[in-house]
Amino acid sequence: MWQGWVNGFLGLWIVLLPFLGLPQNIDRPIIIAIGIIVAIAGFWCATFKGKRSSVSDTDISPPAERV
């Protein structure tokens, strides 16, 4: 839950890094693209994680017996 929000904000931080004094020898477009991907994935995970079905990841039931 909160990890998705943290990942989203870290992605935004990565996008801002090239403009905050990152050395010039590093490819800015690649860093910005990676930051955008991380931010989108993080915010997407944070917003849709609560909308999953009511079955939790730890709710494991035994397999049904075959007849």
Image (tube, helix red, strand yellow):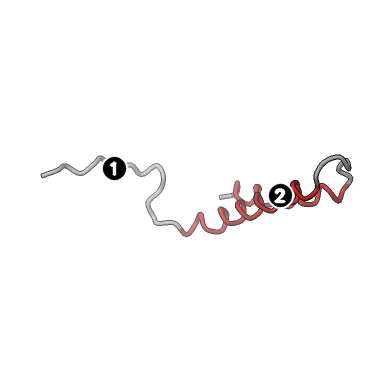
Q: Nearer the viewer, residue 63 or 14?
A: 14
Q: Position of residue 16 (x, y in %)?
A: 80, 51
Q: Quadrant of residue 26?
A: top right
What amino acid is labelled 1 in the image?
Ser
Q: Disc 1 and disc 2: Cα gap in Å?
A: 39 Å
Q: In the visual, does 30 lie left or right of 24? A: left
Q: Quadrant of residue 47?
A: bottom right
Q: Quadrant of residue 22?
A: top right
Mark nearest the camera among 1 and 2 is: 2
Q: How busy is the neighbourhood of tag 1: few (under 14 within 10 Å), some, or many (20 plus)?
A: few
Q: Earlier in the sequence, mark 1 or mark 2?
A: 2
Identified by mark 2, the residue type is: Gly
Judging from the image, what secondary structure is the residue with disc 2 in? helix
Q: Nearer the viewer, residue 43 or 23?
A: 23
Left or right: residue 60 compared with residue 3: left
Q: Residue at x 39, y 55 (%)?
A: 54
**In-image side of 14 versus 56 (left or right):** right
Percent across and percent down for residue 24 are 88, 43
Count the marks. Answer: 2
The tag on residue 61 is: 1
Q: Secondary structure at mark 1?
A: loop
Label 2 environment density (alpha carbons within 10 Å; few <14, some 14–19, many ≥20): many
Choose between 17 and 49: the one closer to the eye: 17
What numbered label is drawn on residue 35?
2
User: In the shown orientation, is residue 8 left or right of residue 18?
Assistant: left
